[in-house]
Image (cartoon, rainbow, N blue to C red):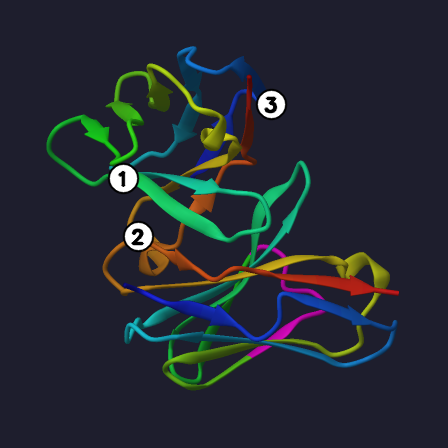
Amino acid sequence: AQSVTQLDSQVPVFEEAPVELRCNYSSSVSVYLFWYVQYPNQGLQLLLKYLSGSTLVESINGFEAEFNKSQTSFHLRKPSVHISDTAEYFCAVTDGGSNYKLTFGKGTLLTVNP
Amino acid sequence: DVKVTQSSRYLVKRTGEKVFLECVQDMDHENMFWYRQDPGLGLRLIYFSYDVKMKEKGDIPEGYSVSREKKERFSLILESASTNQTSMYLCASSFIATGTQYFGPGTRLTVL
């Protein structure tokens, strides 16, 4: 069985500050990893994913995440946040079993203050 | 672009009513999923389907059933709604051999 732990339920930051949202997973096999974002009153949108290859993956809006197999982590970072980044962020993992069913973390609410 | 639509954004029902939540996707995805989302608990999988008429229980199936008669449509049924089923319900779909799921906008269900 696999699980995902998002270490912070809430992260408040000021605009233009850097941010890191932490995600650790447990799995006995190779995994695929995802970050989803949920803006207020909306569904989840895929932010970025790691399937294979380069361990550093980037999104189009400046977020990046690094797959660290030895630490079983997939932390999400952004060097300078905007107020529009205020949202809830979910980390998810699949080992490809059960038709690639995802296991989600409980989410981290990022609040960017002016 | 992938589009997943859900029949209602907001729904208010009374205890004991039968409730249908509908989800439609337009990308010919094999997999479809129903989650509920509650504060502090994240997303919990209720049921998923990997083909027409095929379904598998998720982590919290009690009190729910599903129907998939056509590939693009996946329905969640609350046979007798209860107040503890007040929640945000999210539908998602994906191809069978990838993990990338595409989500609908959600239905916020209130059971009074």
Tell me the amino acid under the disc marked 3: Gln
Q: Residue furthest left?
A: A53
- Name the quadrant of the C terminus of chain A: top right
For marks 2 and 3, give the CA distance: 26 Å
* Left or right for B102, reference B9: left
Q: Position of residue B89 (x, y in %)?
A: 61, 60
For marks 1 and 3, give the CA distance: 22 Å
Q: Main secondary structure of the magenta part?
A: loop
The residue pinned by badge 1 equals A49
**For this rendering, which residue is in front, B4 or A70?**
B4
Cβ–Cβ under 8 Å for marks 1 and 2: yes
* Left or right for B39, reference B17: left
| Same-chain check, marks 1 and 3 | yes
The residue pinned by badge 2 equals B99
Q: Position of residue A10 (x, y in %)?
A: 60, 23
Q: Quadrant of residue B71?
A: bottom left
Does the magenta portion include B63? Answer: yes
| Same-chain check, marks 2 and 3 | no
| Same-chain check, marks 1 and 2 | no
Magenta range: B59-66
Residue A10 circle label: 3
Tell me the amino acid under the disc marked 1: Lys
State which chain disc 2 sits on: B
State which chain disc 1 sits on: A
Q: Secondary structure at mark 1?
A: strand
Q: Secondary structure at mark 2?
A: loop
Q: Secondary structure at mark 3?
A: strand
